[in-house]
Image: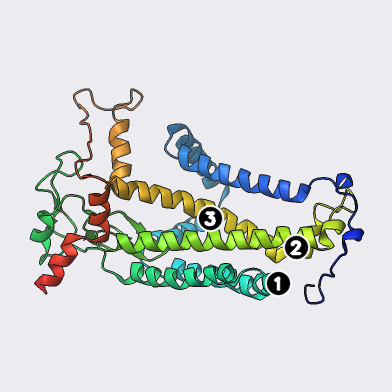
Amino acid sequence: MFGGGTPELSAESYPDKRNIPRMDFLILFLLYLAVVLLGFVMICIGSKTHYLQGLISRGAQIFSYIIPECLQRAMLRVLHYLFHTRNYTFVILHLILQGMVYTEYTWEIFGLCQQLEFSLYYLFLPYLLLIVNLVFFTLSCVTNPGTITKANELLFLQVYEFDEVMFPKNVRCPTCDLRKPARSKHCSVCNRCVHRFDHHCVWVNNCIGAWNTRYFLSYLLTLTASAATMAVVSTVFLVRLVVMSDVYLQTYVDDLGHLQYLFLTFPRIVFLVGFVMVLSFLLGGYLCFCLYLAATNQTTNEWYKGNRAWCQHCPHVARPPAAEPQAYRNIHSHGLWSNLREIFLPATACYERKKK
């Protein structure tokens, strides 16, 4: 039935289903994924708390006593190169991981799914999403995010209103020697001021700003969809293989080996399923966060600064007695459709093309 690898079983050869225990391996595997995801979410949420930050700082102090100083300097140089300078390390890593996942999908899962008579529309959907994803990935990498220069400084100054809290008027960037428009920020990695700065993404080796946020969101959406599609196809294939083949019988031969048999028989497929499932949840969570920012017309930079401004009202945050915190209010949100139109049809990009 599977090209010589797995013989087909007759209905009489299956044992009574009442004597078969539940699929302990799949249950434990799902619990493992849940624990990994829960730990990641707790770290993301707890990273804003002073307690976790204190634990991290104390842990760093302990490691500083254990690790030799020369090794610490080497690690800092590597980290500085990876995260504080423009380089193609993560771009290459992204393409390698994507290539490995699709190679495994093509080499093992695609052919076996054809033998199991899966619909070709579902089998080819990950490839279609891959092509679209690579297009938006390339656009995110090469598109100008909205670099502020002497030539377009006055244009950008007229786009957004200054709120006098997060973005006060008449502030100059000491590095670029330019007046800073509202919602702009100087990126220390790219060494430039970016209009409507969101963040610097190491995976595309570029800043995410006014002119390429639409491409980044489309890239993130197609990447999440491709990972989720591959996870669904691979999981359905694995479950159907367990149910229809002798793996279902051999998995529960004894109490010692029945948990590991499926992984030992199809290790790469099981690892692929776990990897794309975790990736789908992580990307899906980040995509929801980015869509929330887009719907409310915020950037990651503004959201982070807004949280810090909100925390200034907390009683446990120390500040000078005379310092009275100013409440931050998002003045740039003008409704869902207007906010999305601003991202996917940035006005300044049109003005720039007309000027040229």
Q: Is residue 300 visible?
A: no
- Residue, disc 3: 280
Identify the residue shown where x is 72% and y is 57%. 239
Is residue 286 shown above or below 112?
above
Identify the residue shown where x is 86% and y is 65%. 9
Quadrant of residue 315 in the image?
Answer: top left
- Mark sitting on residue 112: 1
Nearest to viewer (mark 2 / mark 3): 2
Element type where label 3 sits in the image = helix
In the image, farthest residue toward the front: 11
Mark 2 burial class by Cα count in 10 Å: few <14, some 14-19, many 20+: some
Q: What colour-coding does the image apply?
A: rainbow
In this orientation, which residue lies closer to the viewer: 94 or 75? Answer: 94
- Mark sitting on residue 241: 2
Identify the residue shown where x is 21% and y is 64%. 147
Quadrant of residue 238 in the image?
Answer: bottom right
Q: Using the numbered discs, state the Cα–Cα distance from disc 3 to disc 1 in whole angstroms.
A: 23 Å
Identify the residue shown where x is 53% and y is 61%. 227
In this orientation, which residue lies closer to the viewer: 9 or 316? Answer: 9
Q: Are marks 1 and 2 in contact (CB under 8 Å)?
A: yes
Is residue 255 shown above or below 266?
above
Nearest to viewer (mark 3 / mark 1): 1
Q: Using the numbered discs, state the Cα–Cα distance from disc 1 to disc 2 in whole angstroms.
A: 9 Å
Apparent side of residue 241 relative to residue 80 in the rendered image (left or right) = right
Q: Quadrant of the N terminus?
A: bottom right
